[in-house]
Amino acid sequence: MKNVIIAAVVASSFLAGCKKDAPAAVEVPKPAAPAAVVEAPKPPPPAAASWVVLEKLGAKIEMPAGAKAEDTSADAANYSVAPEDYSFTVMVSTVTEAYPSTYEAAVDEVKKMTNGFKAFTKNEKTADGWVLEFEGESMMDKSPLYGVVVRKKLGEKSIECSRNESSKAARDSVEKACLSLAAK
């Protein structure tokens, strides 16, 4: 038994001695944790909708809260309506003799008056007017142009709501507002 204890002490001393003479262990760096994914900030939620009264037209239009209407009347009642951030603008006009009087004439007018007219993305005749959604290009820099023309009848009065915008999202906002037009 004495020999076993001596052998154990010698072995442990030998092992301890080996560690002193051995080169220092190299620490292998642990792989870095993947960087946290940084998400792009989310756009603020759209402002609650509210009705903007277009007094001279006897109409109202649903727009983001805080939208303002500017009276742009000349020979007939007209308004320019935009939300506070001016992300889009809606032109609402009394239909006069200067406007196409039929659906077919309106289609031809859009084709003729839209610079670089490409195609209609919506071309619908409605019970009291029409919805024309189309694409063209800007005269200035040839960038895409997205337009909409909505004709509605409010009482005995025909109203046209329209605008050309530089993005589909802005055009879609214009169309949604135009379709909301109602008698005051």
Image: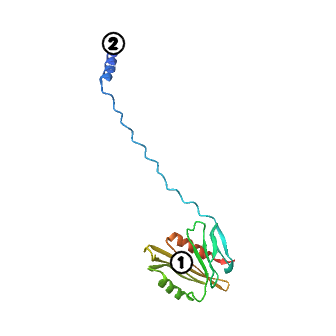
Instruction: Tell me where residue 155 sits by quadrant.
Output: bottom right
Q: Is residue 26 left or right of residue 129?
A: left
Number of numbered discs overlaid on the protein picture: 2
Disc 2 crowd rating (10 Å Cα; few below 14, some 14-19, many 20+) is few
Q: Which residue is label 2 attached to?
A: 6
Numbered mark located on residue 30 in the image: none
Taking depth in this image into account, of 82 and 109 the one nearest to the observer is 82
- What residue do we see at 49% from left, 86% from top? 108
Taking depth in this image into account, of 80 and 158 the one nearest to the observer is 80
- What residue do we see at 33% from left, 17% from top? 13
* Residue 122 visible: yes
Could you tell me residue 123's position as x and y percent? Answer: 51, 81
- Depicted 45 relative to depicted 104: above or below: above
Secondary structure beneath dot 2 equals helix
Instruction: Tell me where residue 80 sits by quadrant.
Output: bottom right
Q: Earlier in the sequence, mark 1 or mark 2?
A: 2
Numbered mark located on residue 148 in the image: 1
Secondary structure beneath dot 1 equals strand
* Residue 127 visible: no
User: Which residue, as the protein is rendered here, is positioned at the far front?
Assistant: 74
Disc 1 crowd rating (10 Å Cα; few below 14, some 14-19, many 20+) is many
Could you tell me residue 110's position as x and y percent? Answer: 50, 83
Q: Amino acid at mark 2?
A: Ile
Taking depth in this image into account, of 2 and 135 the one nearest to the observer is 135
Taking depth in this image into account, of 58 and 6 the one nearest to the observer is 58
Could you tell me residue 63's position as x and y percent? Answer: 62, 70
